C-alpha cells in the first residue's frame, strides 16, 4: 500500500482514491431509464467493494433500483449503527457547462471533479473505506454495522420507506449516521442536528371562462392575476413576518445556546450577498441570517403564472392564474395543520369575483435531535478528533425526508455528519469533492464507530 | 338588379352580397408574410370595386401593405367626410375550431361566416356600396368623400399615421366616419362617442443572481415572486379602487345624462355573467357595470410569471419575476403622467431586498367627442332613420389608436357607427356578420352622407 503526504497533513492511500475514481465512472443517473444498466452496474461494483473490505454484501431488489447492504457479524453486546448513503446521481445536464466530462473523474488542485463526487458517492465510500481500514487493522468493528446505500435518492426515495417497513427487524439499529449535508467551511467539522420540514400547496384562481379583452371588460370583472397577487401579498407583513393566524403557534423557540453557537459562525453580510447574488439581505425582523434559514418557518412562492407570457403586450384579462407555494416548517409545526391554516387564511381574504381551488402537495415534518444525547456527544467527539477543533453545531434549512422516515419507521435519530463544502457544486456542472474531505471522511468513520462503540 | 325581401324588412340586392362574398375570399392576413400577395390582391379587388361604383380609386404604397383610397370629385361648397376601414384581417387560427373554412364564405341563418366578415370588410364595404347606390341614383354625392381603407390595422397601423402626416392636405376633411365598433344589440343603432385610452408597462423584479434552493436560503433573502405580488396588490384596495396617488386627479366625471342613458341599456347581472363566464361581478364600488367599463380607469395585470412553471413542485426561490400591466385611461388622464405615477408608487412601496426594472410600453389617450355637436347630431339622425328608433349613446372600454391619430393629425372628430353584434366572434373562429346589418350599413351610409350634406 503506497502512502504519501499531499497538502499539509493528509495521509493519502492511492488505492482509496483509485476506488473513488472507479466508483465515479458509473453514470448511475436514477431518473433516466437510459442509464438503468449503469445504475445496476454501479450497485454491483459497490456490492463487490463491500465484500472486499470485509463486510457481507447483499443486493435487494425494489420496484425501482436496488438497495445495497453490507453487514459485519452482529453481536448482542454492541450498539448497531446504520450508515446510509445513495449511489445514484443527478443528471449531468447541462453537459456543455462542464470543464471536464462528468463521468471521467479529474483530479485537480486537491479536488476530484465528477458527477456524484460529493453527492453522495465520495461521502459514503469514505465511510466504507473507513470500516475497511478498521477491519483490516483489528479484524473486527466496535459496533454492529448496517451499511445501507440506495439508488433512488435523487428521485425522492420512493422505495426506501416501504423497504424499511418490510425489513424493520433486520434493520433494527440504535442510531443512523449520514454524510450528505454541508460543512460550514474547509476543515471545520459540522454536526447538523436539525432540518426544516416542508409543506407544498398549489392554488389556482379562476375568473372568467375565457381570456377577456381588458378594454371591453376591464373594471367590470375581477382579474385572477390581480386577485392572486392580493392573496400572496396577504401572507407576509412588510417586515417578512407571516400573517396567517396560528402559523407560529407551535414554533419551538430557538434556545439561547443555539443563538450563541450560530452567531459565531454567521456569514457576514457581504458573504451572504456574494453567495446568493441578492441585491440586499431581507428576512423576518429580529432574527439573524442563520436563525432565519435554520429555525424560522417560511412561506415562499416557488412559481407563479397567468395571462400573456410572450414578448411585448397583449391586453387580456386572463381566465385563471396559479401559484405554487411551499412552506418550510420548524420543530413542532405540523404540515397538515399549516396547510389548513393557510387555506383558511386564503378563504378569509380572497378577493371578490373569483373562485379559488387548492391542491395539497408533498409535506414532511421538521427534524430535531438533541445534540447532547449520548450519540450526539459521540458524534461531536468523533468530529473533534478528526478535525482537531470543536465542531460547529448547526441546523439546516432544507428538508431530508428520509431522516423523518428513519425516525418514523425505525424510531432512531440520525447523526448528520456532512462533508460537502459550500463550493462543491452538487446538482450543478463541475461537481467536485475535496480529496482532503475524502480522507477526513475515512478518519471520521473510524473515530465515529470507536466513539459509539465506547458508549456501551 | 334582383331585389327580394328576406326576414322582416331587408331589401336584398344579390349583387351586393356577391361582392361581399368575393371580398371575403381573400385571405388578407396582414401579420403573416405568406399572405403578402393575397393582401395585395385584396387591395386591388377593392380598388376595382371603388372604380366600379363611380369613385376614383388609387393605391398608395407604404413600407408595408398599401392604402386604398376612393374619392369623388370634390367641391368647395360641400363638407368633406372621410370613411375609414381596413381590408386586412386577423389570422384564422385555430383553423380546426371553425365550422366552415374561414375564407370560403358561408351564408346560413341570416349571417355570413368568414374571417373579416364583421372585422372589417363587411362594414366598410357596406359604406362603399351605399355610396355606389347614391351615385347610381343621383349621379353625385351630397358630400366630398375620402374613402380610405388600410391594410395594416390588425398589426397596429404602423404606416397609417405617417401617411396621414405626409398627405395631410390631400386628406383634409371635416369629419371621419368609422364602422368598426359594436352595436348594443340587433337592430339597435349605436353611436359610440368615447373610447378609453391605454398605457402599458412591464415590471421586472430581480432578486438573487440565480434560482436558489428555497430550503437552504428561504427566509434569508427576498423572494421576487412574493415581492411582485406585494407590488401588484398595492394597486387596488379591496373594493377595486386604485390606490396610486394622483391616479384619479384628472378623471373627468361621468355626466348625469350619461348615467341616465347608460342605465337604460345596462345588461342585467346574469347577462354579464353569461357573457364573461365570471363567477360573480366585481368592480369599483359606486359605479354600474357600464360606468366601470366605459368611463372609469383600470389597472390590470395582463400577464404575470416567475419561478417554476411545470407540473408538480420545485422548491426554488426564483431569480426574477415579471408582470405585464396595462392601464385603461379615461378623458383627461395623460398616459405618460399615469405611467410616472405608477412607477413612483412602486418605488415607494417596493419590498426590501429586490431590484425593480420598468419598461414602458405603448400608450394612447382616451377619446371623447361631443355627441351633441353638429356632426354628432347628424350621425344620430342617420342612425334613427336607418333603425327606426333612437340610437344608443355609448362609450366603449377599448382603445382605437387611429381615432386619436385622426384627432392629432387631421384635427377632426370620428363618428363611430358600429355594426358589430355582440356574438359576431371577431378575432375568433366562426366570425360572422349579420346580413341584415350589411344592408343596414348600406342604408346607414346613405342616410349619413345625406344628413352631413344638409348641415352646410
Image: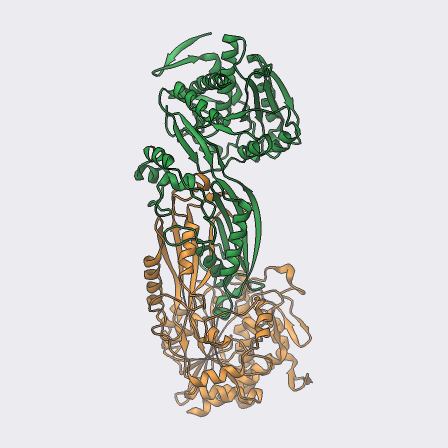
Chain colours: A green, B orange
Is A296 placed above or below A406 here? Answer: below
Please state, as top left, top right, bottom left or bottom right, where the N terminus of chain B lies in the image.
Answer: bottom right
The quadrant in which the C terminus of chain B is found is bottom left
The answer to whether residue B143 is above or below residue A279 is: below
Q: Position of residue B270 (x, y in %)?
A: 59, 74
Q: In the rendered image of this protein, does residue A197 appear above or below residue A123?
A: below
Residue B15: x and y in percent read 64, 79
Q: Quadrant of residue B343?
A: bottom left
Q: Position of residue B384 (x, y in %)?
A: 54, 88
Q: Nearer the viewer, residue B34 or A149?
A: A149
The structure residue drawn at horizontal position 42% and vertical position 13%, both measured from the top left corner, is: A12
Find residue A99 and report its horizontal and vertical position in percent.
43, 28
Q: Is residue A426 visible in this depiction of the protein?
A: yes
Camera-side residue of A440 and B308: A440
Left or right position of B320 against B1: left
Residue B74 in sight from this viewpoint: no
Q: Quadrant of residue A188?
A: top left
Asked whether B362 or A422 is in front, the reply is A422
As rendered, which of A15 and B35 lies closer to the eye? A15
Amino acid at each position: 500500500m503506497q502512502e504519501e503526504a499531499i497538502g499539509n497533513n493528509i495521509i493519502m492511500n492511492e488505492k482509496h482514491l483509485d476506488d473513488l475514481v472507479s466508483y465515479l465512472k458509473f453514470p448511475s443517473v436514477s431518473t433516466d431509464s437510459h442509464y438503468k444498466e449503469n445504475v445496476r452496474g454501479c450497485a454491483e461494483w459497490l456490492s463487490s467493494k463491500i465484500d472486499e473490505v470485509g463486510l457481507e454484501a447483499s443486493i435487494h431488489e425494489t420496484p425501482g433500483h436496488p438497495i445495497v447492504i453490507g453487514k459485519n457479524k452482529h453481536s448482542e453486546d454492541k450498539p448497531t449503527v446504520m450508515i446510509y448513503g445513495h449511489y445514484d446521481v443527478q443528471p449531468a445536464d447541462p453537459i456543455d457547462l462542464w470543464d471536464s466530462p462528468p463521468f471521467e473523474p479529474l483530479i485537480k488542485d486537491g479536488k476530484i471533479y465528477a458527477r456524484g463526487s460529493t453527492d453522495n458517492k465520495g461521502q459514503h465510500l469514505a465511510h466504507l473505506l473507513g470500516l475497511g481500514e478498521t477491519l483490516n487493522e483489528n479484524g473486527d468493528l466496535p459496533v454492529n454495522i448496517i451499511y445501507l446505500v440506495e439508488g433512488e435518492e435523487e428521485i425522492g426515495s420512493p422505495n426506501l420507506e416501504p423497504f424499511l417497513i418490510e425489513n424493520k427487524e433486520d434493520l433494527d439499529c440504535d442510531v443512523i449516521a449520514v454524510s450528505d449535508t454541508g460543512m460550514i467551511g474547509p476543515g471545520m467539522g459540522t454536526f447538523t442536528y436539525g432540518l426544516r420540514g416542508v409543506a407544498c400547496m398549489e392554488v389556482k384562481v379562476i375568473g372568467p371562462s375565457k381570456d377577456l379583452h381588458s378594454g371591453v371588460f376591464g373594471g367590470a370583472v375581477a382579474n385572477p392575476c390581480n386577485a392572486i397577487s392580493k392573496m400572496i401579498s396577504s401572507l407576509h407583513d412588510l417586515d417578512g413576518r407571516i400573517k396567517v393566524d396560528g402559523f407560529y403557534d407551535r414554533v419551538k423557540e430557538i434556545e439561547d445556546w443555539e443563538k450563541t453557537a450560530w452567531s459565531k459562525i454567521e456569514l457576514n453580510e457581504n458573504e451572504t450577498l456574494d453567495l446568493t447574488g441578492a441585491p440586499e439581505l431581507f428576512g423576518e425582523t429580529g432574527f439573524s441570517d442563520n436563525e432565519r434559514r435554520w429555525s424560522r418557518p417560511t412561506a415562499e412562492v416557488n412559481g407563479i403564472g397567468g395571462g400573456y407570457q410572450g414578448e411585448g403586450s397583449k391586453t387580456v384579462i386572463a381566465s385563471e392564474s396559479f401559484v405554487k407555494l411551499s412552506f418550510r416548517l420548524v420543530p413542532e409545526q405540523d404540515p397538515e395543520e399549516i396547510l389548513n391554516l393557510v387555506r383558511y387564511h386564503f378563504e378569509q381574504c380572497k378577493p371578490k369575483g373569483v373562485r379559488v381551488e387548492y391542491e395539497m402537495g408533498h409535506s414532511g415534518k421538521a427534524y430535531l435531535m438533541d445534540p447532547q444525547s449520548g450519540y450526539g456527544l459521540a458524534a461531536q467527539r468523533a468530529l473533534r478528533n478528526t478535525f482537531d477543533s470543536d465542531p460547529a453545531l448547526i441546523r439546516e434549512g432544507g428538508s431530508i425526508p428520509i431522516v423523518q422516515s428513519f425516525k418514523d419507521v425505525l424510531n432512531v435519530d440520525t447523526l448528520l455528519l456532512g462533508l460537502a463544502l459550500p463550493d462543491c457544486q452538487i446538482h450543478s456542472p463541475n461537481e467536485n469533492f475535496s480529496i482532503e474531505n475524502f480522507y477526513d471522511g475515512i478518519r471520521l468513520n473510524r473515530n465515529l464507530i470507536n466513539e459509539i462503540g465506547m458508549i456501551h
